[in-house]
Image (cartoon, coloured by chain):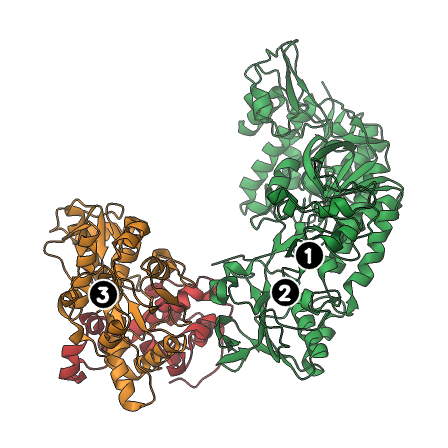
Amino acid sequence: MSKNKTISAHRISSDRIDQLHEISGVNVYACYQCGNCSAACPAVEFMDPTPHQVIRKIQLGFIDELTTSETPWICAACITCTVKCPRGVDIAKVMEGLRQIVLRSDFEHGHLCDIDEKMRKKLPQIALIGNFRKTIL
Amino acid sequence: MELSYYPGCTLKANAKNFETSALAILQHLDVTVKELEDWYCCGVCFSQTQDNLMQQIAPVRTLVKAKESNRRQLLALCTMCFNTLKRAIEFIKNDKEKRDTIHQFMDREDTKFYGDEVEVIDILTLIRQIGLDKLKAAIVKKAVDLKVASYYGCMLLRPQEIAIDSPDDPVIMEEIITHAGCENVYFPFRTECCGSYQIVSEPEIVRERARKIVGSAVKNGADLMVMLCPLCYYNLDEVQRDIQEEDATFQPLPVLYFTQLLALLMGLKPDLQDFRLHAIDPRPVLKRKGLL
Amino acid sequence: MKRVGVFVCHCGINIASTVDVSRVVEDLHDYPGIAYIQDYKYMCSDPGQNLLKEAIKSEKLDAVVIAACSPTLHENTFRLAVQTVGMNPYNCEIANIREQCSWVHKDRTVATEKAKRIIRAVVEKALLDESLEPIKVPVVRKAVVLGGGIAGIQAALNIANSDYEVILVEKQSSIGGRMAQLSETFPTLDCSQCILTPKMVDVAQHPKIRLLTYAELADVSGFVGNFKVKIRQKARYVDWDKCTGCGLCIEKCPQKVASEFDQGLGKRKAIFTPFAQAVPNKPVIDCDNCTYFKTGKCRVCEKLCPFEAINFVETDTYIEEEVGAIVVATGYDVYPVLNMGEYGSGKIPDVVDGLTFERLLSSSGPTGGEVRRPSDGKIPKEIVFIKCVGSRDPEHHFPYCSKICCMYTTKHAMLYKHRVPDGQPYIFYMDVRAGGKGYEEFYQRAQDEDKVLFLRGKVSKLYQDDDKVVVCGIDTLSGSNVEIRADLVVLAMAIRPSKGIEELAKLLKISIDQNGFLTEAHPKLRPVESLSAGIYLAGCAQAPKDIPDTVAQATATAAMVANLFAKEYLLHDPIITGVDEELCSGCGLCVAVCPYDARKTNREKGLVEVNEVLCEACGACAAACPSGAAQQRNFTDEQLNRMVRAILTT
């Protein structure tokens, strides 16, 4: 992870931000950091950084911190953040964008064969497919 | 009234109680549903990316089938299917360029889908359309002081453009419950996420969610909780067992599909439902309240 | 042919860097119709104007064209200048070669060519310009002020103190408005009613003010200086000429209703005055809630009134007045909590809006100034204030900042702390906007002296849990989600223009902006005028603002009114669209398209007639007229044709 905290014109306009924008289609610059996404997020206690911090770090160009963090994988795309946002920032799509950046260089996050056989039989199909859709390119 | 019906994978496998009870109450309300022929998985999660159209193909294929059925309305019982299909319609309607790309890709289909031809409908909205008075008239059993916690989850309410009711303060389930002669329990977590598919890779998140959601309903005096999503159902029913194992003081709460409760209230044969499939056995409370 | 002089301005390098000015002068020198042409570095400067005046005299010019910046800037300057040497100002024209040429082009050759064509076109216009005299209109020196809150009170008093008559119209039975409901005011914490009521009394006693309460504007016609207004006096069912305000009827009335003035916290009677210091202090009967009106029985007030003032058969009456100016000061409403699903949709009794909390703090309020929560009357020990509720939320509610909430919420927390010293106030905020005299200091005092805990972030939801309200929010400064079990929650709801503003705006033909507030003529330079002449705006009807700003704006409207009334006649721009009676067939097409009601069909004469004062010279009628009878002065069809030809000719 980059520990370099220098902010520069180069960093805050990096290709990685463009890439994220291309995948997600979200304009993160509308965010004014009210924090409502984090306040409402049902999984926030498992996240570091939290959703509003994710958006801020993108604005600052600290994308590496996000692609190496667990936050996007904790997100279950419940879309609460998106409906809460007063500025129309689709945070759920940003989370997906971050996951895609990782997956597009690494194909898989987590291992399907790790799922317990007994569990796999019991789980509803939508749980399994939903999970695959998130963790495999 | 006749409409197409899209069951989705889970209703044919792990959520049989949902399908049988839903189809039974609709029949009882004179609604004919015709299952789509040769349907596909909807893809479960609507694609959140802008640049990957492959993931849109699955729901669009299903919508093509629905269009070919020549019935305008398509009932999706599973809320995840509902969400994915309805968002796919919005997507196809609003992005002409990407729609064209998808059309070009789907060259084996004879029918092209433009978005306006099919309306995806959930069962709550459908019941409203059938008429709450008609529903009321179909209720034959009087539940004894039954306090019901209606759990919405995410997929019927978010995002805003496909929401069937206010994402913050919905009323539709409570309205139907009132007309069915039961008492509503408002609990603050009724629209909060259950943890969804994180049950696969991060089950502790789901346990935490289930503890909060169920705990809040219990605290507000609920006798049972009803819902419409097979995944929420699993996370809030099955997971209660895990919580009980960890925490002996945890007070469990029976969980039913919304349609199971309506079927009982309509006096439909109870053996239509398999109560053995429930992790938290609802039979004691159903007996106590005069529904079994 | 008229002798037209052309003066080309360099505007420093603003024009000259893109337009080759000497080339323009050289090439236009022999243009037919130009008798004289010259360039100068700054035409608007004193030497530039002198040069213009000298040339008019020495060259015996009949008209001049100044090729310079936009006419919105210096047309007036040059027209005044030519007048001093005896030229009719309407013979002075501006050719805009800056905003419409040099500023928008880079290529010098192209810009120079375009500048020449613009000048040629305006020269063609100047050749046919007529000398015109402003239209004189008499002024009715009486104003009507709509709304009796602090804005309307201030405007009315100031106009009246200039010795002009004022009619103050208020829809409630008493003046006072929102300010009368407030407890204490920031940043000085002086009692709101104590500073307001003397002004209310002044209004009542002022010989130049006619106070019409329980009344509203029903219709308006006319134009600046000459409006006709029709005011509906709602039936009060009490003859105020007989009533002495003894209050016996109120005391004995058996019907209790939730008090609007106390935001529903306290009760009032069906015959009532809204509050103790009401002006006029005379009651009205609320016929929707009066037992007699509902059941046909009761009439207790009628029996008891020693002056026989009760009159159950009273009906609405109408008052017609002529006025020269209108001040709109209709104030604001608070966006209802009902709209906030995440904050309980108004169903949680201990979640209230800021105005309700004012009543809980007010010594004249339902709790006598003790902070007691609505559900059980307990004194809240932990209290949460949430700012920006509905404001700054373009996605769900309103995009704008309601402006007053930062300060009044800080004040609420501070006053609460003074009343409940062992209590803890929390404020959720996104930004603190404390721009104003003494405001920042006030905010700092709340933090360091009164220990108000400011939490930076939104509250995502709140809910009732036992007898507490659980507030789920975030403090983004620490990055922590926080949960507070509060006894009372106060929401700083968005400010909305008061109900009925749209109908009123339609009636007055003034515009409202995208957020529903009345639109000022210019956001900086004409902030108290509407776009319709003679109609002025004060207070929160125009935009959310606090008391000092409201008073300043109201005072400004009074200055505008006094300014208008100081003249015997108003001068109306003579550039209007008339009717050539020879050509007019009375078809009425122009009447239908006129947005200002300036044109009327005279059926007897078979002609259209124009009210020159109402005409704003938009030209819609001239475009619609099939026969060419509607010609705009100095913008005739012939002038426009020649201008177009001059532009198109290379």
Q: Which mark is residue C268?
A: 1
Q: Amino acid at mark 1?
A: Arg
Image quadrant in which you'd find residue C169: top right
Q: Amino acid at mark 3?
A: Gln
B137 relative to C444 in the view: left or right? left
Q: Are marks 2 and 3 in contact (CB under 8 Å)?
A: no
Q: CA distance from mark 1 to mark 3?
A: 50 Å
At 73% from the left and 74% from the top, the residue drawn is C442
**Rendered shade, chain B:** orange
Q: Height in image: C133 above or below B85?
A: above
Quadrant of the rendering where the C terminus of chain B is positioned: bottom left
Nearest to the eye among marks 2 and 3: give it.
Answer: 3
Q: Judging from the image, what secondary structure is the residue with disc 1 in? A: strand
Q: Judging from the image, what secondary structure is the residue with disc 2 in? A: helix
Q: Chain of mark 3?
A: B
Q: Amino acid at mark 2?
A: Gly
Residue A104 in view: no
**Rendered shade, chain C:** green
Q: Judging from the image, what secondary structure is the residue with disc 3 in? A: helix
Closest to the observer, C587 or C383: C383
Image quadrant in which you'd find residue C53: top right
Q: Which mark is residue C354?
A: 2
Residue B192, image x, y percentages: 37, 71
Judging by the rendered image, the residue that carries numbered circle 3 is: B260
Image quadrant in which you'd find residue C292: top right
Q: Height in image: C510 above or below C464?
A: above
Closest to the observer, B177 or C78: B177
- The red-tinted chain is A
Nearest to the eye among marks 1 and 3: give it.
Answer: 1
